[in-house]
């Protein structure tokens, strides 16, 4: 069977075109309690992993989530998959509220949302053959009946993912890292999901293999009309695959924007710092570039600072940043940013801006000021930072 | 920077006997480290970059390992050196930092005391003096509140702080050579930029640095010379400009091409290198990159020598294609890269 025939066989019959976004997240909070005390097991605090985050993902879109470790991007993706019980807010998947569904009622939905993990060495059971790893979900969800049907389907999936279908009886250790990641992708595809959450799917792979896996993910999206949530800390990779990108900092979304716009015209100082920290693989361009090296570390999510959570590391921060949480403001072309002193926003841009409905409830209600119009940091306080 | 080599690796071979056969991790590698330079060794997993660097420190020794060739550092020959001789050099003359700062500090001892212990192992100083020096080191690598931080345990440090502490420990006895094995890989980009800056200071102050990495962005930021390794051999060697602007080996083209670059428009499809790195147990005949190379010709069945082919001193490569034809072959969609299909 050729790959295109295999693809045709696995594509679900097109039903009536469903309307509305596939995933809607509304003021989601995900806290983890910290227990203390010897006998009473009192709750003494909470890790504010995800703190009032709202967004929606249209069907067929790739939504990139970036941020430093500990910013809540992985927690957020796990909450959406309902691997965690959300603290507050709502999650709607395919039009239905799944925020507090029990395990039993979630089970039929599980086949529609799948995950690809970071570590291809840890995410495959070393004692199972590839045929079982990819085939077991099919049997569990009754998507294929009988050993022969399952085997045929697994071989199709392996072929679609660029693996040799004859390797169905091999164990994971017989494959390289890139091939294992392909097995993980085949397993995620087996149940014909609508949504795939890819949590750092390429960061454990060598550069030349990363490109192969990214290209495969893009091909599969076109073939099977998949919606991706792509979680990564590598902004280069995220830019390549994503239609829209959300930047997270300490449990909050600080900027959400169409991918190209985010990289061309970042508004939030944190995004700018993050972009500037990425070295460019071109020695002359790299030497000519002004780089912002952020000082300090991310604050603790247990007792996050009031006001803007980035204020402590931000060279533009003023008193208002430390007192009032900046609202998420919607600028032209669906570009959202939560900053009191946005970079490169002129008075004209502000005229069309409004507080976004996604803005956290605890945030202030005043629009930011248009300080200086320049997009470059060289004339701003950043120069003193380096 | 002077041109006298500080460290010379000559025709180094490292093989490991495994159940599946002989694994040739490093296969005839020669290079020099000059005083005050940052030498980057670039390659994918299994290219032999870490094994060759660890062999300098004697960290690959084991009952199943065999070594050939020589590594000269001053009057010392390191491949044949006794363990006692190596122990004197480790930390005091040649120091190393590792990829994973989470596992390279002992979790049950205070960070400061681990560094002080290292200082006292090589220098005859009192405990109080070692502590003072540790505080100084903490300041140098940018750890805030060094007086308090020195008494913390590793779990109280963040990843970036731990990597700083590792650098402080490596610098404790003012070594001549710092070997940094993927020092930024496990860190966030913002922390990565801080660590690169610290490494730059380290180089200016006292040491030559051997930087082992797969991140060409970090290489572009800090390296003076670059070695590209593939399948246990050096396939290209040159200055930073040689490698980035006039690369001669198709594998180097592929590495440069498969990077996602923020300073350029995004391509529709990311150029990738077809296939996978070779198994070190059964390497292909001739050029190890031949099975993945779209430009391979019959002559590639012989192993090409690592030699200067374009007349630029110090720019060596192992590819037998005509240098003139390479300049046309390596341009894919207007930038350096490797065509995806193997013909």
Image: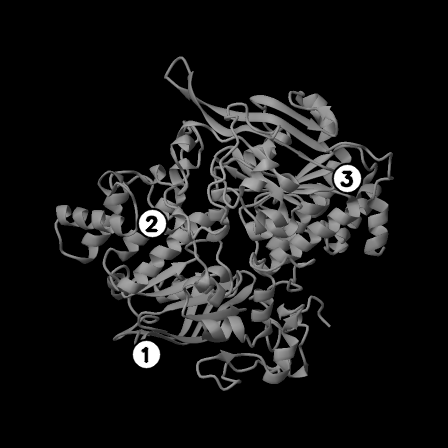
SS assignment at label 3:
loop
Q: Chain of mark 1?
A: B
**Which residue appears at 87% of the width and 39% of the height?**
A13
Residue B312 percent location from the top left of the image:
47, 84
Q: Which residue is mark 1?
A: B3
Sequence-first tag of 1 and 2: 1
SS assignment at label 2:
helix
Q: Which mark is on residue A286?
A: none
Depicted A66 relative to depicted B235: above or below: above
Residue A127 percent location from the top left of the image:
62, 43
Disc 3 to disc 2, C-alpha distance: 46 Å
Mark yes or no: residue B312 visible.
yes
Q: Is residue B296 left or right of residue B107?
A: right
Disc 1 to disc 2, C-alpha distance: 30 Å
Q: How many marks can you see?
A: 3
| Observer-nearest of A355 and A228 | A355
Q: Which mark is on residue B164?
A: 2
Q: Which mark is on residue A192?
A: 3
Residue B57 percent location from the top left of the image:
34, 63
**Which residue appears at 85% of the width and 55% of the height?**
A1
Q: Are marks 1 and 3 on the same chain?
A: no
Q: Is residue B87 left or right of residue B247?
A: left
Residue A41 quadrant? top left
Q: Is residue A39 left or right of residue B136?
A: right
Mark 1 is surrounded, within 10 Å at the Cα level, by few (under 14), some (14 to 19) or many (20 or more) other residues, namely: few
Q: Nearer the viewer, mark 1 or mark 3?
A: 1
């Amino acid at each position: 069977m050729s790959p295109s025939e295999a693809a045709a066989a696995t594509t679900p019959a097109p039903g009536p075109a469903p309307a509305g976004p596939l995933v809607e997240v509304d003021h989601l909070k995900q806290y983890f309690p910290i227990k203390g005390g010897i006998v009473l097991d009192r709750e003494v605090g909470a890790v504010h992993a995800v703190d009032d985050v709202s967004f929606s993902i249209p069907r067929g879109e790739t939504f990139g989530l970036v941020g430093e470790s500990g910013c809540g991007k992985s927690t957020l993706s796990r909450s959406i998959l309902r691997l965690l019980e959300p603290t507050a807010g709502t999650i709607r998947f395919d039009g239905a509220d799944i925020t507090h569904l029990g395990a039993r009622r979630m089970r039929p939905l599980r086949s529609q949302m799948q995950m690809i993990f970071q570590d291809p060495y840890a995410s495959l059971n070393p004692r199972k053959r590839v045929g079982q790893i990819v085939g077991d979900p099919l049997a569990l969800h009754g998507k294929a009946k009988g050993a022969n049907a399952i085997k045929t389907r697994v071989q199709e999936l392996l072929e679609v993912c660029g693996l040799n279908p004859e390797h169905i009886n091999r164990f994971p250790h017989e494959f390289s890292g890139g091939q294992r990641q392909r097995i993980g992708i085949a397993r995620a595809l087996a149940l014909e999901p609508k949504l795939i959450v890819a949590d750092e799917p390429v960061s454990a792979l060598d550069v030349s293999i990363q490109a192969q896996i990214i290209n495969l993910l893009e091909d599969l999206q076109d073939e099977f009309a998949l919606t991706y949530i792509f979680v990564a800390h590598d902004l280069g990779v995220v830019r390549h695959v994503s239609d829209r990108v959300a930047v997270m900092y300490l449990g909050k979304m600080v900027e959400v924007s169409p991918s190209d716009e985010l990289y061309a015209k970042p508004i939030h100082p944190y995004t700018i710092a993050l972009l500037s920290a990425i070295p460019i693989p071109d020695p002359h361009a790299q030497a000519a570039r002004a780089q912002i090296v952020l000082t300090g570390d991310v604050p603790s999510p247990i007792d996050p600072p009031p006001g803007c959570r980035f204020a402590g590391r931000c060279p533009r921060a003023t008193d208002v940043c430390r007192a009032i949480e900046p609202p998420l403001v919607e600028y032209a072309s669906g570009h959202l940013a939560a900053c009191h002193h946005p970079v490169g926003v002129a008075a004209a841009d502000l005229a069309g801006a409004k507080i976004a409905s996604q803005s956290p409830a605890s945030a202030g209600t005043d629009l930011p000021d248009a300080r200086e119009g320049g997009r470059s940091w060289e004339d701003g306080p950043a120069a003193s930072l380096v | 920077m002077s041109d006298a080599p500080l460290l010379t690796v000559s025709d180094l071979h490292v093989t490991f006997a495994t159940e599946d056969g002989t694994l040739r991790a490093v296969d005839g590698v020669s290079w020099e480290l000059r005083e005050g330079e940052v030498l980057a060794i670039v390659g994918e997993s299994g290219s032999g970059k870490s094994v060759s660097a660890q062999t300098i420190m004697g960290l690959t020794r084991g009952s199943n390992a065999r070594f050939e060739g020589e590594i000269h550092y001053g009057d010392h020959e390191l491949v044949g050196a006794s363990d006692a001789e190596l122990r004197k050099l480790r930390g005091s003359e040649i120091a190393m930092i590792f990829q994973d700062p989470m596992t390279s500090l002992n979790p049950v001892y205070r960070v400061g005391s681990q560094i002080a212990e290292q200082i006292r192992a090589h220098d005859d100083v009192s405990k109080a003096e070692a502590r003072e020096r540790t505080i100084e080191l903490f300041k140098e690598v940018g750890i805030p509140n060094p007086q308090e931080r020195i008494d913390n345990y590793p779990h109280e440090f963040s990843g970036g702080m731990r990597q700083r502490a590792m650098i402080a420990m490596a610098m404790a006895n003012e070594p001549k050579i710092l070997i940094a094995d993927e020092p930024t890989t496990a860190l966030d980009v913002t922390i990565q930029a801080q660590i690169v800056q610290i490494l730059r200071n380290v180089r200016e102050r006292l040491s030559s640095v051997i930087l082992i990495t797969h991140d060409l962005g970090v290489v572009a930021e800090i390296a003076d010379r670059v070695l590209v390794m593939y399948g246990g051999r050096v396939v290209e060697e040159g200055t930073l400009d040689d490698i980035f602007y006039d690369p001669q080996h198709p594998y180097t083209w592929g590495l440069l091409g498969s990077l996602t670059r923020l300073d350029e428009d995004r391509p529709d499809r990311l150029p990738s290198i077809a296939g996978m790195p070779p198994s070190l147990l059964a390497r292909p005949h001739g050029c190890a990159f031949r099975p993945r190379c779209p430009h391979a010709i019959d002559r590639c069945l012989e192993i090409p020598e690592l030699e200067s082919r374009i007349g630029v001193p110090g720019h060596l490569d192992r590819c037998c294609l005509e240098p003139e034809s390479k300049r046309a072959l390596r341009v894919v969609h207007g930038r350096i890269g490797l065509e995806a299909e193997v013909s």
